Each structure stands twice: as structure tokens, then as C-alpha cells.
């Protein structure tokens, strides 16, 4: 996240609670988002890592989880084994494709397959599966093998696996419950809201949505929101 975006989010957080939801684990928020956001905005900012399987808020003791739907280590090990098998059988990867970090990562409340690893340069990720066909094929292979889990496509190269019913819609509803507001009074801004996209599941909650394509469109959306406040 750029410092310019961080300042925008902080300005918005002065007027209304702001939340960031992602398939990334909490540690990635600490690296990729929090340094850009002025610390004065932390008390009004909420973080939902691992596709809404956890919700963090800021207290005098730092960032603390309000809830976290963790997978047991033995669950994660089984999921990892199934992913490895499905990747081989579907030919999702060639043998010579590089990786920056582990391709399969246990994130506490989620297991994620990242084709090139979590910290791969975006330039390496962006063209690998732009139409999602590789990950759709992998997801279809995984679904009958892991029927008790949600299997979603996220980011540019990822497939995220969490317990059934634990997804971005779950996170949205838990946040609304914590804030004591109706889901219908919230706005969700996302870049993959179409059917089959990793944000589509929130549509069924009744939340208002706004589709964006990139960070610059997100910045415009924030600016428009700021104009609605006195």
C-alpha cells in the first residue's frame, strides 16, 4: 500500500469505521498495509485476514484477534497433501516454474496454494492465470476431495481453503455484529465482485457494493466517500 492510499484510509477512518479484508495472513498486513496507514487511524481500522476467517482490532496492547477460526495442524497437513496431489494431476504447474517462498502455506485459519509463493514479484504473478482457468481447473479437482471446506480463488495466483461457511461474507457479518450496525448500511469495495469472483460471496449478504479495477479507482471511491461527510 502506498502512503497516499494510507492517508486516504486514515481520513476515512476519522469519519467511519474502515476494514480491510484479504486472503493474506495477518503478517502480510503488517508488511504490506499497516506501515502506510497513520497509527492514529488504527483504533478505527479493522483487519480481516485469511478471507474473513479472523478479525483484528487495535487495543492498548496492539492488534488483537476478536475471533479466529483456526484449522488444526492435522487438518492443514491433510489439505496440503490433497493440494499437492491435485496440482500434479491437473498439471497446474510446469516443472521449471520458480517459487518465492513455499507454494502451499498454512496460515492458521486458512491453507493457501500460491503458484509462485506469497512474496513473488507481481510482475511474475500477473500473467500466469489472468483468466483464472488454471485455478478453476484446480478448484474443480479439489472440491470433491475436500467437501467440508470452502475453496476460493484469490489474488493473481492463489487458491484459498478455509472451513465451510468461513469466507468474506462470514467476515462481513461478524464485523457488522461487532460494530452493532446492519450489513445493509455497510459498503464493500472490491475488484472481483462478478459471479465466480473471490468477492462475489459478499453480494448475498445484502451489503452495498462498488466494483473497482485497481488502486487508483479505489482512491477515487474513497475521495467520493469523503465528500459525503461534513
Image (cartoon, helix red, strand yellow):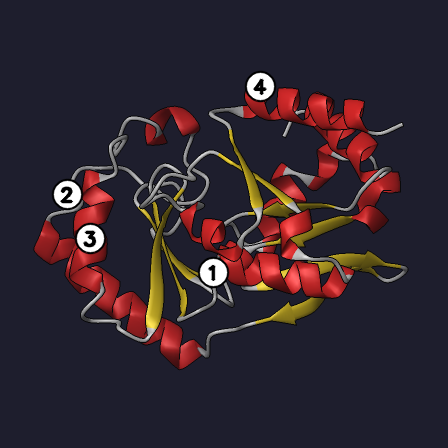
Q: Earlier in the sequence, mark 1 or mark 4?
A: 1
> Is residue 172 left or right of 99 when viewed as pictured?
right
Dot 3 and dot 1 residues touching (CB under 8 Å): no
Q: CA distance from mark 2 to mark 3?
A: 16 Å
| For discs 4 and 3, the disc positioned in front in the rendered view | 4
Query: If you read the primary sequence from the N terminus, does the residue marked by circle 4 or circle 3 appear first?
Result: 3
According to the picture, the residue beneath numbered tag 2 turns out to be 95
| Image point (45%, 63%), residue name | 110
Q: Secondary structure at mark 4?
A: helix
Residue at 17%, 37% in the rendered image:
96
Chain-order first, disc 3 or disc 1: 3
**Dot 1: element:** loop
In the picture, measured across the screen, residue 185 lies left or right of residue 121, that is: right
Q: CA distance from mark 2 to mark 4?
A: 36 Å
Q: How many marks?
A: 4
Q: Position of residue 111 (x, y in %)?
A: 40, 62
- Name the residue carrying label 3: 138
Question: In whole angstroms, how far apart are the C-alphas of marks 3 and 1?
Answer: 19 Å
Left or right position of 27 against 46: left
Disc 1 residue crowd, few under 14, some 14–19, many 20+, Cα 10 Å: many
Q: Nearer the viewer, residue 41 or 192?
A: 192
Q: Nearer the viewer, mark 2 or mark 4?
A: 4
The spot of residue 46 in percent (x, y) is: 72, 51
Helix, strand or loop under label 2: loop
Kindly identify which residue carries mark 4: 216
In primary-sequence order, the first of circles 2 and 4 is: 2
Judged left or right of residue 138, residue 48 is right
* Cα–Cα span, label 4 and label 3: 31 Å
Amino acid at each position: 500500500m502506498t502512503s497516499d492510499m494510507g492517508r486516504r484510509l486514515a481520513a476515512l477512518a476519522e469519519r467511519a469505521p474502515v476494514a480491510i479484508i484479504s486472503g493474506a495472513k495477518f503478517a502480510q498486513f503488517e508488511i504490506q498495509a499497516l506501515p502506510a496507514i497513520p497509527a492514529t487511524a488504527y483504533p478505527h481500522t479493522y483487519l480481516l485476514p485469511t478471507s474473513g476467517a479472523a478479525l483484528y482490532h487495535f487495543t492498548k496492547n496492539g492488534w488483537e484477534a476478536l475471533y479466529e477460526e483456526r484449522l488444526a495442524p492435522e487438518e492443514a497437513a491433510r489439505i496440503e497433501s490433497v493440494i499437492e496431489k491435485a496440482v500434479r494431476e491437473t498439471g497446474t504447474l510446469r516443472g521449471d516454474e520458480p517459487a518465492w517462498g513455499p507454494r502451499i502455506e498454512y496460515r492458521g485459519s486458512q491453507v493457501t496454494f500460491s503458484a509462485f509463493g506469497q512474496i513473488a514479484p507481481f510482475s511474475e504473478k500477473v500473467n500466469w492465470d489472468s483468466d483464472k482457468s488454471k485455478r478453476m481447473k484446480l478448484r474443480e479437482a479439489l472440491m470433491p476431495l475436500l467437501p467440508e471446506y470452502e475453496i476460493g480463488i484469490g489474488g493473481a495466483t492463489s487458491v484459498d481453503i478455509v472451513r465451510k461457511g468461513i469466507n468474506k461474507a462470514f467476515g462481513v457479518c461478524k464485523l457488522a455484529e461487532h460494530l452493532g450496525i446492519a450489513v445493509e448500511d455497510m459498503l464493500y469495495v472490491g475488484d472481483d465482485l462478478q459471479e465466480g469472483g473471490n468477492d462475489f460471496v459478499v453480494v448475498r449478504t445484502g451489503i452495498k457494493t462498488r466494483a473497482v479495477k485497481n488502486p487508483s479507482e479505489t482512491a477515487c471511491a474513497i475521495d467520493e466517500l469523503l465528500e459525503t461527510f461534513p
